[in-house]
Image (tube, rainbow, N blue to C red):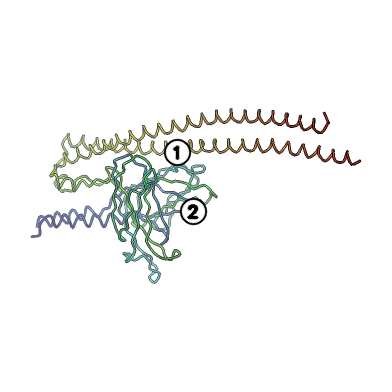
Amino acid sequence: MGHLYIFVALLATSLSIINAVELTFELPDNEKQCFFESIEKGTKSTIEFQVITGGHYDVDMELTAPSGQILYKDVKKQYDSFTWTADLSGIFKFCFSNEFSTFSHKVVYFDLEVGDEKPLVEGMTSHDTAMTLMETSAQNTHEDLKTVLDYQTHFRLRESQGRGFAEDLNERVMIWSIGESIIIVIICIGQILVLRSFFTDKHKTASAT
Amino acid sequence: MLPVNYFISLFSLIILISNTSGLYFHIGETQKKCFIEEIPDETMVVGKYKVQAFDPSVKDYMPSAPGIGMLVEVRDPEDKIILSRTYAAEGRFTFTSHSAGEHVVCLHSNSTAWFSAGQLRVHLDIQVGEHAVDYQQIQAKDKLSELQLRVRQLLDQVEQITKEQNYQRYREERFRQTSESTNQRVLWWSIVQTVILLITGFWQMRHLKSFFEAKKLV
């Protein structure tokens, strides 16, 4: 009987689904990509997104509640973070749009956190007594390390942006330099040919008359 | 009375099923969708997905998609395929990175339709590094107390931070190399272009001089 009770309690804990998903995907030009998540009423959720490469590093984002109400809508944003509490249960939809761009495809990173972090140990006994000092400080250390990892992610994204731009620049310098050199050589040869053609015609007409 | 193991496995199964119905998106039946994961080396990545097919008669998505398999392809930063397997409509894939960098995870349904006949709803959950570790399992296997489990989690987190720092050092080196290469290229190509201009200028003058002398204009 005790086992059954524990099982039902564990099942109840599992049903309040707590989720954190972060994905990086490529958004081609003139396209829109939507993601859906089912969120329970009263759950605090955070969506954070950043454009890593492409064009002017901007994207449109729109967050819609199950009732159709638009919770967040912004155009040409490079980075933003939005927190909201779901006032009704249902499917929330958030869409990234690159429809304003004609040729640059973007790489977008987003991080969706729904609810609180699930507890490490799913056991009823851990909440019966207050936590010892050791447990509290371990918990605090865990929270701080999570913050460190979060900062690292942000730093990595910024650095990735800068590096992508630098690599693009490097390539462009090479391509344009080669192009310019070829243009210089073509123009020089062209000039000579055109000049020669002037004098050749005149000489013919001069000798004819 | 059923053994506790039965409950644990049933509970884990329910966790697995309910966790996969998290974030979802729609793709065409023949469309390929890729996600980029920039990770340090020796990092484990666990992905869980579930595919539902659109049923035009009911105008909704069926609870499962019979007969559809998903080809999961993972490429490492050198564009080499490190995982390429077809799983069922609902599956779990895992890989460990051997080199640091951008890994690309692609999902592609193995539908044999010529054009994208229908839409698929794909539930996806990708967890990286210490998020991928199942602490329930570790506690059950090693029989750890809550504090010991918490310390194990802290150790995993710190290890991931260290790996990420290492990766960041390597990335910064690459960035610096790229910038120095740009600097060198700008310098070198400017010199080359100046030399080309001078050479073509001299050639032009010499050619014209001999041309005019031949035409008896000079």
Label drawn at residue B205: none
Three-letter code for the amino acid on which mark 1 is drawn? Gln
Q: In this view, does B3 lie above or below A20?
A: below
Please determine whether, in this image, residue A114 is positioned above or below residue A207.
Answer: below
Q: Which residue is labeled 2 in the image?
A: A31
Tag 1 and tag 2 share a subunit:
yes
Q: Where is residue B153 in the image (x, y as percent from the top left)?
A: 22, 40
Distance from label 1 to label 2 (Cα)?
21 Å
What chain letter is assigned to the residue under label 2?
A
Chain of residue at mark 1 = A
Q: Closest to the observer: B7 or B176?
A: B176
The amino acid sitting under disc 2 is Glu
Is residue A178 toward the left or the right of residue A11 in the image? right
Residue B47 horizontal/vertical position (percent)? 30, 51
Tell me where residue A19 appears, x and y as whole percent.
30, 49
| Disc marking residue A161 | 1
List the single residue furthest toward the front.
B214
